Amino acid sequence: MPRWTIDRPDQLKFGKVTALSVRIVAGRLAVLASEGPPTLEVTEIGPTPLIVDHDEDGTLTVAYQDLTWDGILGWLRPGSRSTTLTLTVPKDCPVQAGVISADAVVAGFENRTNVRSVSGEIVLDGVSGDIHADTVSGSVESRGLTGDLAFKSVSGELTVADGVPHRLRGNTVSGRITADLSLAPTAHVTLNSVSGSIVVRLPHSADADVTLRSTAGSLDSAFPELTKNGSPGSKTVSGRLGGGMASVSATSVSGDVTVLKKEI
């Protein structure tokens, strides 16, 4: 199995890459879909080297030796481990990308994409397929989403811009969730927070069953078809928009929940 130790700026080219796993601590990471040959370009790196492995089955791994995928959300070590790197692999390549405090951009993939962050910001640009994003306090921004996205965080924010999801699941304790959506016909959207606010923006012509719930926060809707219902300890705004093919549910314990109309 080919192995490289990267301790200075360098560029590598690879043969066939069938899966990618990359894990870094601080700095900047870009993982880009490309029709060209798979490449790794490291433009900055601290004193701790990166280890690069390319298995016979095509799995490419770029990581610090003691930073595992399963332990990345709880991994903190002293020392300078900042690096700036760019990886290009095929768009149908499954991707695992994990960062501690680094900012990351993942763009153009169509298969399975898993991202994890402690405090770093993650941007998913034009990523489709099956997407999972877990953070502690880091934010996740998705642009041009299609497919399925599952987001889980403690205090990190989720922003979905120009999304057309089939399934969208967002769960956070205190982070804000903002979703600007054009719903697929059978889309299923479920957003939950404890104290964070939730804002959903839908088209004027949306076809969806919508339910908003909050215990102590306010509920607001720009759609007159949605009606308020109240009971001790619980408030609900619900109703059907258009034919009601899709479903949208947003629930917060003490945060505000709002549904807005997109501008025509």
Image (cartoon, rainbow, N blue to C red):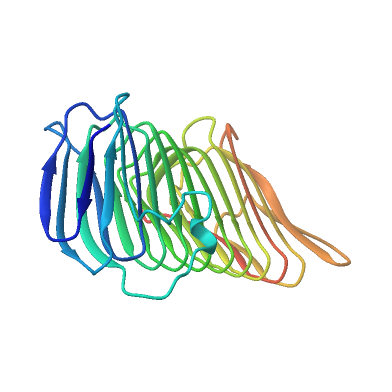
Where does the image place residue 74, in percent across and percent down from the top left?
54, 63
Work out whether residue 64 or residue 250 is closer to the camera in this orientation and state it: 64
Left or right position of 44 against 115: left
The vertical placement of 245 against 228, above or below, is above
Work out whether residue 99 or residue 76 is closer to the camera in this orientation and state it: 76
Where does the image place residue 103, in percent across and percent down from the top left?
32, 64
Image point (13%, 43%), residue name: 12
Where does the image place residue 13, in percent across and percent down from the top left?
12, 38
The vertical placement of 5 against 188, above or below, is below
Work out whether residue 183 or residue 243 is closer to the camera in this orientation and state it: 183
Instruction: Tell which residue pokes out farthest to the top in this image.
Output: 57
Quadrant of residue 129 in the image?
Answer: top left
Left or right position of 153 against 112: right
Q: Is residue 76 visible?
A: yes
Work out whether residue 7 or residue 195 is closer to the camera in this orientation and state it: 7
The vertical placement of 142 against 242, above or below, is below
Image point (15%, 31%), residue name: 35
